[in-house]
Image (spheres, helix red, strand yellow):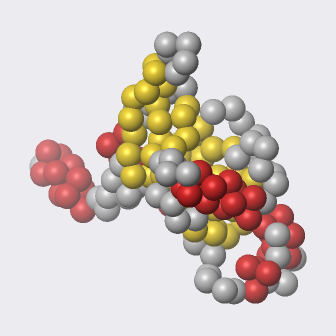
Amino acid sequence: MAQKCSTIFALNRVKMPLHLLKLCVGVDDVDQLRKSQDARTKRGERLVHVTRNRPRRDAEVLDGGSLYWVIRRIVAVRQQIIGLEEVNSADGIRRCAIILHPDLMLTMPQPRRPHQGWRYLEDDVAPADAPKGGPAADFPSDIAAELRELGLL
């Protein structure tokens, strides 16, 4: 009977993507990230972020996962991950290139503490996408987060 129950439970589990959370170092706001990435795209470069380690749960990340960017201690924007590739850096060390879709999706602001590297972010705790053209779009993400905490947005 226990075998039958666990099989039924496994069949009923909803498959959710796994995301990555990364600090966007040196960037002050989403607009600066957008301009930087637009410049790279115009030069014909792919949008990649090279990191030291490849996610061990890569199949889950590639099954609809996104890279959530933390800008000035706020999760503010995400980009869909469209691939992971092994690359060699100039010093010959193997790295992982996270290949990103060019579209930046604003998220509901969510405060985050600094951390090194990337972290897994389960889908059920990932911030929702911000409504397109909503009132929060007119404010910088940190101010929008404070206004939301106060119940004003």
Q: To which quarter of the image does residue 128 belong?
A: bottom right
The image quadrant of residue 146 is bottom right
x and y, in percent, of residue 130 in the image: 63, 75
Who is closer to the viewer here, 127 or 34?
A: 34
Q: Is residue 122 visible?
A: no
Residue closer to the observer: 14 or 37: 37
Q: Determine the residue positioned at 39% across, 29% down.
A: 86
Quadrant position of the C terminus in the picture: bottom right
Q: Is residue 72 left or right of residue 100?
A: right
Image side of residue 144 versus residue 79, left or right: right
Horizontal side, residue 74 vs residue 20: left or right? right
Q: Is residue 22 above or below residue 144?
A: above
Q: Please name the residue shown 86% across and 70% down the image.
A: 143
Task: Please say whether residue 59 is visible from this viewpoint.
Answer: yes
Residue 87: percent from left, percent from top: 43, 27
Residue 51 coordinates in the image, percent (x, y): 55, 32
Count of numbered circles in the view: 0
Give the residue displayed 73% in from the left and 79% down from the top. 137
Question: At 71% across and 36% down in the image, what residue appears?
Answer: 115
Above or below for 89 versus 9: above
Front position in the image: 126 or 100: 100
Q: Position of residue 111 (x, y in %)?
A: 76, 56
Identify which residue, 5 or 125, lies in the foreground.
125
Is 143 above or below relative to 32?
below
What is the residue that sits farthest to the top in this orientation?
A: 92
